[in-house]
Image (cartoon, helix red, strand yellow):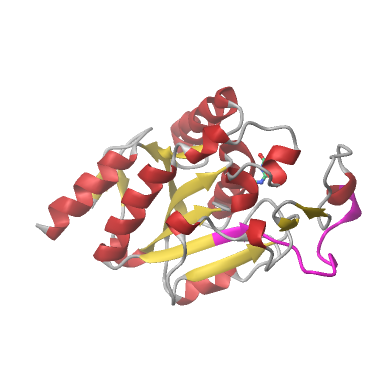
Amino acid sequence: MTLEAQPFDFCMDVGHTALVIIDMQRDFIEPGGFGASLGNDVSLLSAIVPACQAVLAVWRVAGGLVVHTREAHRIDLSDCPPAKRNRGRPSLRIGDVGPMGRVLVAGEPGNQIIPELAPLVGEIVIDKPGKGAFYATPLHELLAQRHVTHLIFMGVTTEVCVQTTMREANDRGYDALLLTDCTESYFPQFKAATVEMVHAQGGIVGWTAPSAVLLAALQRQAA
Ligand code: TIU
């Protein structure tokens, strides 16, 4: 199918494309989590949840591969560099006990994906120690095994984990599309700048489009 995107059409087929949902975790989206502890207004991020739900529902019906990621460290923090833990002197450090359990530690309540976008059995869930979902994870191998060549991105935050992962994907040879109304930042100007820098220079990192374009194409295909 062909999607009208920036900087030009994005051509893909569902069988070789994964929907990658980055870090839609309670720690980033709900009050009292890690995002809030960094001084961020988390209400900005929850606004994209309905649009993400709509895409996920239609993508599942189309039979597309779904990948969820979580920024999650091992319980002994052996995969958390001290530089990451200590940066910025936050009131809550990674591994400290906060209102939703240990911050960014696998298995803790705050580390879970929000219920509205909870993974289904059989969907890929990647726990990642970095901002990019390819660093120190099996993601590339899992996608290669399934002959995935194209990625569609949603999630948070646009300029941190989403952009880092798109750049990693670009260097690994994937064509990637960012759904502009399904990603958000604590800083609206950073989201806007990221969307522009992804599709600038002839798609130097990838493509961008509103989710309505994908939904319409999937509905046309189903008809
Ligand atoms: N998932 C993700 O983007 N992690 C962050 O820490 N983002 C911030 O913007 N802080």
Residue at figure coordinates x 74%, y 62% from the top left:
105
Quadrant containing the C terminus in the rendered view: bottom left
View extreme (left): residue: 223
Tell me: residue 105, above or below residue 213. below
Quadrant in the rendering for residue 9:
top left
Viewer-proximal residue among 2 and 164: 164
Instruction: Give residue 171's position: percent from left, percent from top.
Output: 58, 52
Total numbered circles: 0
Of helix, strand and loop, which mostly describes the magenta segment? loop
Task: Give the left or right position of residue 46, taking residue 39 as reference.
Answer: left
Task: Give the left or right position of residue 151, taking residue 107 as reference.
Answer: left
Instruction: Give residue 65's position: percent from left, percent from top.
Output: 39, 67
Viewer-proximal residue among 157 and 168: 157
Q: Is residue 134 at all visible to an observer of this figure?
A: no
The quadrant of the rendered image in which ligand 1 is seen is: top right
Residue at figure coordinates x 31%, y 64% from the top left:
60
Please say whether residue 8 is one of the residues in the magenta stretch: no
Task: Give the left or right position of residue 210, taking residue 78 as reference.
Answer: left
Q: Is residue 19 at all visible to an observer of this figure?
A: yes
Residue at figure coordinates x 70%, y 66% from the top left:
106
View extreme (front): residue: 99
Quadrant in the rendering for residue 140:
bottom right
Residue at figure coordinates x 55%, y 48% from the top left:
166
Please say whether residue 76 is one of the residues in the magenta stretch: yes
What range is drawn magenta here?
A: 69-83
Instruction: Give residue 26's position: percent from left, percent from top.
Output: 60, 52
Viewer-proximal residue among 131 and 25: 25
Instruction: Give residue 141's position: percent from left, percent from top.
Output: 56, 73
